[in-house]
Amino acid sequence: MSVVRFRPSAPLLFPLPSLWPFGYNGFVIGLIVGSAFSVKGEWEERAVDTPFGSPSAPFKMGTLGRLEVALLRRHGPEGKVPPHRINHRANIYAMKTLGVEAVVGVNSVGSLKEALSPGTLLVPHDFLCPWSVLTFFDEEAVHITPQLDEGLRRALIEAARRAGIEVWPRGIYVQTVGPRLETKAEIAMLKAFGDVVGMTMAHEATLCCELGLPYASLCSVDNYAHGIGDEPLSDEEIRRRARENSGRVEAVLEELRP
C-alpha cells in the first residue's frame, strides 16, 4: 500500500501512550464504520481512555483480509449515537494512541447526482463543509491544510478492482450537521458543489490531519438525497440499503493491501 505519511502540523496537545494491540507485529489500520458493517470472526475488545472522554465504543482488534485492524463503530456498539453527538475527537485520538498507521472511514452517504445511484461505492478525493468542523486546537490558532490521503485513496480503488466491484474513483463529499436530513432547497444548493452528502467525514478527515494520520473514505451510497430522484426518503429505507451495500464494502476492505 502506498501511503503518504503527513507529519503533524503542530505539536500534539497531550502525550500519547503506546498501547500496541494484540501482539502488534506490523501495519495496523484504523477502521471507522457505521452500524450496518458486520464483524465476523474472533476480535479482541479494547477500551481506550482519552483526554477528550471515551470513544464511541470499545475498539475491536483483529484481522480483516491481510490487515491488522483497530475497528471502531462511530455510532456506538448498538448504533444509537446520532451524528451530532459522536465524540470524534476521542475517536481519532484513541486511534493515534493505539498506534494505527492510517485510518479508513466507511461513510454512508446520499447521492447528489442522478447518475450516482444507490448501491454504488465512491472514494472521494475532496470534501466540503460549509459549517463548523471540529479541531484539537481550541485554545490556539493552528492552521492545517485538510486533505484526503492520495496513496490511501489509490489503495482503496485498487482493492475494489481486485474485488471486482465498481467504484467511483473521485467525488466531493459535502458534510452537513444532522441528525435531520437536508431540505430540498439545501440539496438544490449543495449539488452544485458536491457529489455525495453525509454528516461525519469532514470531522474525521480534519482531525486525522491534525494528528498526522493519513485518512481516506470509502462511501456507501445508500439513497438519493432529498429531491434527487423520485423515491421518497425514509430512515428505514436508508438503513436497508446500507445493509445491502455492506457486503460490497467488506469485500473491498478485505482486498486492501498493507
Image (cartoon, rainbow, N blue to C red):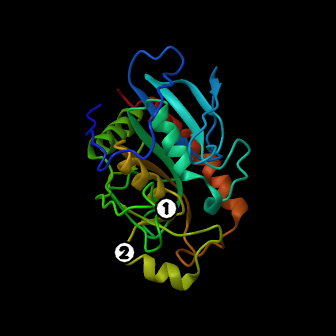
Give the answer, above or below, for where 144 lies relative to 149.
Answer: below
Which mark is on residue 117? 1
Image x and y of residue 231, in percent: 62, 72
Quadrant assignment, res 179: bottom right
Residue 70 position within the rendered picture, expressed as x and y whole percent measured from the top left? 52, 31
Please say whether residue 176 is visible from this viewpoint: yes
Kind of residue at disc 2: Phe
Q: In terms of depth relative to the viewer, which is nearer, 35 or 112?
A: 35
Residue sitting at x 37%, y 40% = 156
As drawn, 130 above or below 99: below
Identify the residue at the far bottom of this view.
185
Q: Is residue 248 visible?
A: no
Where residue 29 appears, as percent x and y from the top left, is 44, 32
Q: Is residue 123 above or below residue 234?
A: above
Question: Quarter of the image holding residue 3?
Answer: top left
Label 2, label 1: how far apart the Cα atoms are: 18 Å
Q: Residue at x 52, y 75 (%)?
A: 228
Closest to the observer, 211 or 196: 211
Q: Quadrant of the C terminus?
A: top left
Please rate how many residues cluster around mark 1, counting C-alpha atoms within 10 Å: few if below 14, some from 14 to 19, many from 20.
Answer: some
Residue at label 2?
Answer: 193
Q: Are marks 2 and 1 in contact (CB under 8 Å)?
A: no
Q: Quadrant of the N terminus?
A: top left
Rendered residue at 35%/64% (across/down): 141
Q: How many marks?
A: 2
Q: Observer-nearest residue: 3 or 245?
A: 3
**Which tag, 2 or 1, sits closer to the chain's start?**
1
* Circle 2: element type: loop
Type of amino acid at the residue the image marks with label 1: Ser
Residue 26 locus on image (x, y percent): 39, 19
Residue shown at 42% from the left, 57% from the top: 137
